[in-house]
Image: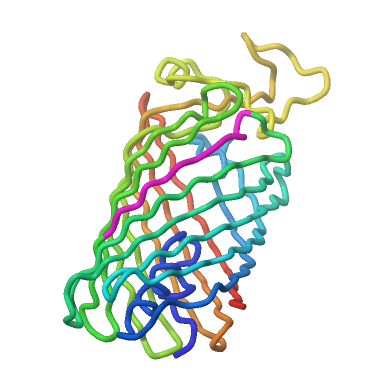
Amino acid sequence: MGIASRTSARYSHATASALFVLALVGSGPGARGQSRYVDVSLDYLHDDNIGRAELDRDTLEDNIVTLSSSLNMPRLLGSRAGLLNSLRLEYAAQAEWEDLSALTASAASTFRYQPGAAFSAPWYEAQLVAALMQHQDSDIRDGARLRLNLAVGSDFTDRLVGRVGYRYELRRAWEGEVFDLDSHRFSGSLDYGVNDWVTLYGTFAWQTGEVVSTATPRPQVLTASEARHLDEALSERPLGAARVGNFFEGDRVAYRLDADSLTGELGLNVALSRKLALDLSALHFQAYGDGDNDYDGLQLRAGILYRF
């Protein structure tokens, strides 16, 4: 079997590649684990609302190319459990809004346990991810992020796999308070293996907590926001701009708001060989923020993963 979605199609979701390896590691009665391996991925992403703005005048598009590499270290813990520790380095280059380009270094530890021996017996997993983020020229976005992921999954058939999950995310910025964020996310997903090489997958999620929306200053959003800061990375202040209140013409402000968000994703993964996989996906998001600051957007992604 080649690298299907359980090893790479969900690679952008941080856990799936790792968790499939844990299943492999724990499947053999005499297995003691798998040697270290390296994943390298190249992704293209088109985001039609990178500032998470409501009004058309503030809706900004961009194309982002991301190169990442991760060192993965699996370990078997008995016959029913596995642990995977990973170190990851990622650089995301933005074509239009270059100041948002970012280098991210992260470390993750994922534990999986499957108490039953039956084919459809559920498995349980917990993952902790810590990351540091440095942007090209957006100090308000630089900082650290901590994620806790919990999930339960099952193989319904030899081709259909389902899971439900919960994620808590804590983010803290080095400068200002706009990107000091807390959120809770609940999700469900299905993977369907068309054959040994092609997998279809889908995810639906609801998130509640704090978000950041960057927009032209408006009293309505200002009143609803918990924190705010001039977003120089997404502003378009012309030379000789006139002053408008506390800001200038062309300025955009990053607002921290409470919001409920819905996301839906559909994807296709094709294993080109035992070490190479191609992944295509589309994700739509819709947020309902305080102060009637509602926004939506679409992300189109194409990625390729190679495993050493």
**In the displayed structure image, the side of residue 182 where residue 218 appears, left or right:** right
Residue 114 position (above or below residue 177): below
Residue 96 position (above or below residue 248): below
Q: Does the magenta stretch include residue 9?
A: no
Kindly indicate the quadrant of the structure image that contains residue 83.
Answer: bottom left
Q: Does the magenta stretch include residue 142?
A: yes
Q: Which of 298 and 133 is in front in this view?
A: 133
Dividing the image into 4 quarters, which one contains the C terminus?
bottom right
Q: How is the image coloured?
A: rainbow
Q: Give the x, y percent position of residue 220.
A: 43, 18
Q: Give the x, y percent position of residue 13.
A: 45, 60
- At horizontal 44% and vertical 64% (from top left) the residue drawn is 84
Main SS type for the magenta part?
strand
Residue 217 position (above or below residue 126): above
- At horizontal 61% and vertical 42% (from top left) the residue drawn is 133
**In the displayed structure image, the side of residue 228 where residue 25 appears, left or right:** left
Q: Nearer the viewer, residue 33 or 19?
A: 33
Q: Which of 293 and 26 is in front in this view?
A: 26
Q: Give the x, y percent position of residue 161.
A: 28, 75
- At horizontal 43% and vertical 39% (from top left) the residue drawn is 295
Residue found at the very far top of the displayed protein: 245
Q: Give the x, y percent position of residue 16.
A: 41, 67
- At horizontal 42% and vertical 15% (from top left) the residue drawn is 223
**In the displayed structure image, the side of residue 137 where residue 206 appears, left or right:** left
**Magenta span covers which residues?**
140-151
Question: How many badges with numbers are in the image?
Answer: 0
**In the displayed structure image, the side of residue 150 where residue 43 appears, left or right:** right
Dividing the image into 4 quarters, which one contains the N terminus?
bottom left
